[in-house]
Amino acid sequence: MDEPNQFLPRAGLQTLIDRLNHAFDRCLGPVVLDGIVQMRPLSRVEQLPAGHHDHQAPGSYRMTRDDGTRQFDWANGPQALKPLLFTPEEPLWRVDRDDTGRLAFTPHNPMRQRTAVIGARACDLAALRLQDQHFLHGEHPDPYYGARRDGLFLVAVDCSHPTDTCFCASSGDGPGCGDGADIVLTELDDGFLLRGTSDPGRAMAASLGLAAATTAQRQAGRERIVAAAAQQRALPDADLSAVLFARQDHPQWARIADRCLACGNCTAVCPTCFCHRSQEDPVLGGSHSEHLRLWDSCFSPGHAYLHGAHLRESIRDRYRQWLTHKFGGWVTQYGRSGCTGCGRCISWCPVGIDVTAELAALTEATK
Ligand code: SF4
Ligand code: SF4
C-alpha cells in the first residue's frame, strides 16, 4: 500500500468534489437519507454526513448526530458498490414479434456511464476485487458489469469508526484500504491524508496542488487505523472452510433455521453475493418482451428448483448453503472466503442472526 503523502485541508474537499463532477458523468457520495447512509449524487460538501455516526448491532441500524465536523465518522450503510456495477435489474435483450409472427431479438447494449464515488470503505474495495474476479476474470466476462467498471473512479476512505458489527480486520480486508481505489483518504480532525493509488488517481491528486503531509499527520492517520482495528469483533480462529464442510449435520443449522425467515436481506446487502435469475417481462398484447436479469438469493424458494425438484427445500438447507458457500466454497472457487467483514448481513437481518456468532457455534468442538 502506498504511504499517504499529501494533506487535503477540510476546506479543500469541495474542490475535489467539483473536479470529480467535472471529469465524470456523475459523482456519488455518502448522504444521510431516511436515517441511513446512502450513496447518492454529490455536488456540495454540505451534503456529506458531518457529525453523523452509525450504531449497528444484530438486527439494528441507528444514526445519531452531534456537533462533530468529521464527515466520515460512520462505518457503512446498506449499500456497498455492488448495486452500481451488478445492478439489481438489468435488461439483457428484447424480442419483438411482427404481424406474421416472426421474432426479432435485439440485445441491450451495456450502458456506459463514468462514475466517481467518494466514501468507499476497505470492505467495499475487497468486495469489488472479488466481484471483479467473478464478473471480469472468469471464462465469460460480463459486458454489463465491465462497461460500468471501466468508468469507475474510487475515492476510498480508511475506516476510523467501526461499528459493533464490523470485523474487516479479522477477515484481512480493513480497516485501512487495500488495492482497488484511485485515491485513498484518511480523515483527521482538520482534513485528510490523501494518496493517489492509481495513475488517474495520482493525476487527480496532483491537480489539487496539495502540500506534503507532515510526519505528525501521517502518524495520527496510522494510529486511527490501528485503533479502529482494535475495536472490532473477530471471526473464530479456525479453518472455517474445513469446519463447515465437516459439520454439515451439526444441530446448530436447525437452531438457525428456527429463527431465519429466508427473507434474503443478508444476500441483498452482502457486497459479494452475485446470484441472479432471468425473467421474461412481456407486454399484454404479446408484441414484445424484455428479458431481464434480476438479483436472486440462495434463500429464495425457487433458487435451487431444478427440473421439478427442490434441492434445498428447507430453510436449514438454504442457510447452510449460504454460509458454507460464503466461507468454504468461495475458498475453492476464488482462493479466499467470500466475506469481507462488513457486518451488513448482521445489521440488516430482521431477526438479528449474527454470522460471527453462528460460525463460533459451529466451530465449537462439541455438539
Ligand atoms: S457475509 Fe456478511 S459480513 Fe461478510 S461480506 Fe457479506 S454481508 Fe458483509
Ligand atoms: S439470515 Fe436473516 S437476513 Fe438472512 S435470510 Fe435469514 S432472516 Fe433473512
Image: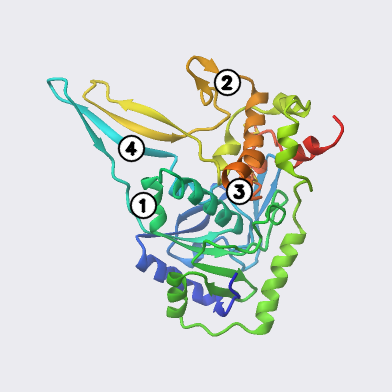
Residue positioned 66% across, 50% down in the render? 341
Q: Earlier in the sequence, mark 4 or mark 1?
A: 4
Ligand 2 location (quadrant): top right
Residue positioned 75% across, 25% down in the render? 249
Q: Earlier in the sequence, mark 2 or mark 4?
A: 4
Label 1, ligand 1: CB separation under 8 Å: no
Residue positioned 64% across, 64% down in the render? 176
Distance, label 3 to label 1, CA atoms, is 25 Å
Q: Which residue is mark 1?
A: 147
Q: Earlier in the sequence, mark 3 or mark 4?
A: 4
Q: Amino acid at mark 2?
A: Leu
Q: Amino acid at mark 4?
A: Leu
Per the image, label 2 sits on a secondary structure element best described as loop
Q: Is residue 188 above or below residue 33?
A: below
Q: Which residue is mark 4?
A: 92
Q: Which quadrant of the figure contains the C terminus? A: top right
**Residue 335: mark in rendering:** 3
Question: Disc 2 or disc 3, which is closer to the eye?
Answer: 3
Question: Disc 3 or disc 4, which is closer to the eye?
Answer: 3
- Find residue 40 and report its horizontal and vertical position in percent: 46, 54
Distance, label 3 to label 4, CA atoms, is 30 Å
- Find residue 112 and report its horizontal and vertical position in percent: 33, 53
- Within 10 Å of the Cα at label 2, are there few (<14), some (14-19), or many (20+) other Cα atoms? some
Distance, label 2 to label 4, CA atoms, is 27 Å
Q: Earlier in the sequence, mark 3 or mark 1?
A: 1
Q: Amino acid at mark 1?
A: Ala
Q: Which quadrant of the figure contains the N terminus? A: bottom right
Answer with the quarter of the image where residue 61 lies: top right
Q: Which residue is mark 2?
A: 311
Question: Disc 2 or disc 1, which is closer to the eye?
Answer: 2
Question: Disc 2 or disc 4, which is closer to the eye?
Answer: 2
Answer with the quarter of the image where residue 329 lies: top right
